[in-house]
Amino acid sequence: MIHKHLQYYTSHLKGDIPSGIVVFLVALPLCLGIALASGAPLFSGLLAGLVGGLVIAWLSGSQLSVSGPAAGLTVIVLNAIEQLGSFQGFLTALVIAGFLQMVLGFLRAGIIASFFPASVIEGMLAAIGLILIMKQLPHAAGYDSSFEGDESYMADTALSSLHAMVDSLRAISPGALVISSVALLIMIIWELSWFRKRKLFNLIPGPLVAVVWGVGYNLAAMKFAPEWAVNNLKHMVTLPVLDHPTAFFDQFVFPDWSFLANSQIYTVAVTMTIIASLETLLSLEAVDKLDPLKRIAPTNRELRAQGIGNMISGFIGGLPITAVIVRSSANINAGGRTRIACFVHGLCLLISLLFFSQYLNYIPLACLAAILLQTGYKLAKPKVFMHFYKKGWGQFLPFVITVCAILATDLLEGMAIGMAVGLIFVIIANYHAAITLTQDGSHYVLSLNKDVSFLNKALLRKFILRIEADSTVVIDASKAGFIDPDIVETIEGFLTTAPDDNIKVQLIDLHGKEKIKKHKAHVVLNGRSKKPQAVTDPLAG
């Protein structure tokens, strides 16, 4: 259900407004870093963040999802700009991609999200949590690391991330370490039950206090103890400073429509459409899992919203936009409950660009790293691994394999591997559950419990071979909605040979599912006298 009445939003303002400010602080360096990694103007990343917060927040059906430039598309954007030889040409491809994404929403392609297994989605969240921890530890220690790595994990950076963690231990900045350590301690204390019971502390989120601490400490250290301060601009928020508010519109870059005659932009547009849509649907499914209020977002509406957002972003010179799980997780973690939080984050981006960019540049990245470290721990805490271990191997293996695959490759490849493993376990489960055979002396019941496909043919033949001569068999298809022709053919063969072994067969409710030829087989009425004994399949264990 999508809540639209005003009272619903006003009742959550006390959590949404501070949360939006926290998400803004987290999103700000990411927007800049992703633009830098994409080979695009820095302002394009901020424009994409603005569209995600001010436009998509209201068009989307999700109350908690935060949209903005995604690091998973940086390589595609970089290659596209180089391939087309023009950023304006790339913007033309982005407008087309947004239109195609909107069409997918109207075609109801969002149903794909319903086929993501819970174990795979949880595995994706845990993997992102581990990536956050690995990527943010160097920031927390004051070691120079890539911004785009905060949300992306390319295959060629897997080893470099481990090296960065090790190197950061040899290049610790005392000031950054103090800022991040105390900021992390503040957020841990803020979640203690004693603090949660106090109304005042509930009104102010811990991450926001952590940012205030970082700025206050660093300003004091720069004045009284410079050796304990963070002075390197690489470890500070770096926001473009506009001379006057109207200069904001001078930063717009518009598409070059002459590239419509270039066939390459259509290939780029289709590629961006597919990847952006998949990342959005994956993030949306993950956000629904994290939502404390357990709401379900409409996927088709989300695709339409993202498509409109990407068209607007392309028209004014922004980067591609997707729903992003890291910023969404930070939103939930900071206490956000409705779309107001995402809108506030976009509003803060706009106000900061127009009026306060020079002041926001006082924020050390170390305190933002602490916020993401806490978010990463919540996504990948040991309790999550133990939860799936207790569920059995059918849930635990897809979960762990998804985590490992994402760490070893990237988000989309890792999810594809996790989905393939999850599908294998689903097939195995359905293979054994579709057909069962029970025995009571010389009486057998062969039950077709659900839709029976050709994959169950080997199991059916195995059960048929176990039926002894001089017995009676009931083939019950009352619970099956569909029976594959291969299954029908196997049953027909059994009906033909049954009289040779003096096997009497009764058919139940096969009419209307598949036509079976009439055979001269004896029919026996139900005459069971005791509880049937299950015939187990040795492969089922």
Image (tube, helix red, strand yellow):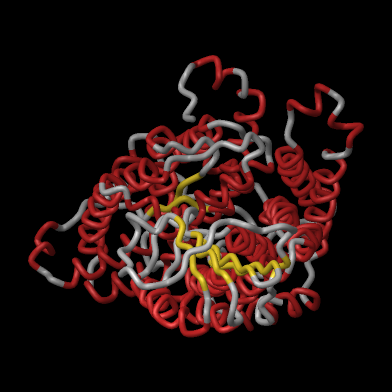
User: Would residue 437 be seen by someone viewing this image from the given angle?
Assistant: yes
Relative depth, front residue between 333 and 170: 333
Q: How many marks?
A: 0
As rendered, which of 133 and 469 lies closer to the eye?
469
Residue 98 rendering spot, x and y as whole percentages? 27, 52
Answer whether residue 145 is visible to the viewer in this image: no
In the image, taking residue 103 as reference, residue 431 lies left or right, namely right
Residue at the limit of the structure toward the top, as seen here = 7
Foreground pick, 229 / 59: 59
Residue 451 coordinates in the image, percent (x, y): 45, 61
In the displayed structure, 345 sits above or below 121; it is above
Image coords of residue 43 (percent x, y): 39, 52
Residue shown at 41% from the left, 38% from the top: 60
**In the picture shown, does residue 420 fall above or below 195?**
below
Q: How far across and down, in percent of the image, does residue 486 sit?
A: 37, 76
Q: Is residue 368 above or below residue 1?
A: below
Quadrant in the picture for residue 481: bottom left
**In the image, 462: left or right of 176?**
left
The quarter in which the C terminus is drawn is bottom right
Q: Residue furthest right?
A: 194
Q: Is residue 474 left or right of residue 515?
A: right
Residue 187 picture quarter: top right
At a point 26% along the width and 49% down the height, the residue shown is: 107
Q: Residue at x 13, y 64 (%)?
A: 259
Please tell me which residue is depicted at 55% across the width and 43% down the height of the picture: 358
